[in-house]
Amino acid sequence: MKGSWSGTVLLVSLEVAFVLGAGVPRAGTQGEPTIIRLPGTFRVSRADDQVIRLGDVAESIQAPDPETKQKYEELIVMNAPGHGEQNRLPRHYILQSIRQAGLDFFNVQFTGANLVEVYGYGLKISIQDVLQVLQQKIQHETGWSDDELILRIISTPARDVWIAPAERVDITFDRASPMTLGTTRYQVRLFVDQIQVKDFPVVVLVQHRRKAYMPVRNLKRGEVIGPDDIREVVLYFDNEMLDQQTADSRDEIIGQQCRVPLAPGEAIQWRALNVNYILKRGDPVQIVLKSEGLTLQTLGHAQGRGAVGDIVPVKTANTGRIVKGRVIQRGLVELVQS
């Protein structure tokens, strides 16, 4: 019994050694290695390709001799994915194919990618391509720049879209919401040679990145806003009405009255401001004309009301002529030459 047990142990040890290759001479272990460089992706180039050979997918094969290289190049490593499908080819799959073909797999070395993404025959329309076209569409509608438009993906198809090769591919979008900003659902339609082939939804968050203004201190109702009372900030708007109501011009805020109290941290909205008319009809004004380094002054009377920056009609005191003057401050206007 003891001798039988020892023989069993020896037999198992030899089997394990044979499987692991430990202590067993390996064919070609002393020869020049075969070096196979793999790409990250491979695309089937013909519709009638049924299998993929190592020579097709590898970027390069360096073998000890031309005959060995040809054997590796002709080796079938996988079936070609179907039209518009995708598969993966890892290194150990290739080694398994080499071993099953009876070729030397001990002296094989790989460089490049560890895994090859294999795409079936067809044209790939990536989700990023679709979103880029959508971004261009929104920019065309709004006039926003790349810095102003923020597009965030919420929901898209799980995979990229594959279509047959075509001379012309068109992508159209139908927006489910009347509003551009916020979480919006678009129905995407792909047309190949003017024939619709795909239809799927994309949900995105659209934001408008732009400057706005906030008070630096508490402002009371009726208080006139001065240049040191506000600061410029950059905000991301995802509500179209709020975007339209928030003031975006420093010059049009300064000199206005607060219709309601304003606190620091609140973006100033147009509806929170009252126009501060510092000039009313009949007020005496000084008219200033600046030209070629000269400053000329005369007196007149305002013929309408105006805030800082407004252009109002003014009647000169000496000639009674009606001219246009830009309001500089209370009682002072600058002549606007027509």
Image (cartoon, grey):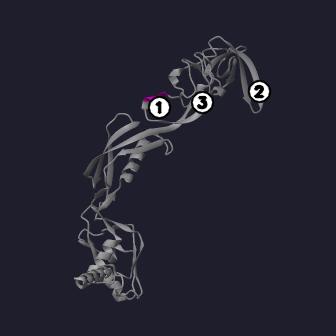
**Residue behind mark 3:** 250
**Residue behind mark 1:** 243
- 1, 256: nearer the viewer: 1
Per the rendered image, the range of residues in magenta is: 241-245
Q: Can you say which quadrant of the picture contains the C terminus? A: top right
Residue farthest to the right? 294
The local secondary structure at tag 2 comes to: strand
Query: Residue at 32% of width from left, 52% of height from top?
Result: 170
Answer yes or no: do the residues labelled 1 and 3 have beta carbons within 8 Å? no
Chain-order first, disc 2 or disc 1: 1
Chain-order first, disc 2 or disc 3: 3
Residue 206: x %, y % from top left: 42, 40
**Residue behind mark 2:** 295
Q: CA distance from mark 1 to mark 3?
A: 16 Å
Q: Amino acid at mark 3?
A: Arg
The local secondary structure at tag 1 comes to: helix
- 293, 88: nearer the viewer: 88
Quarter-wise, where is residue 142 in the image? top left
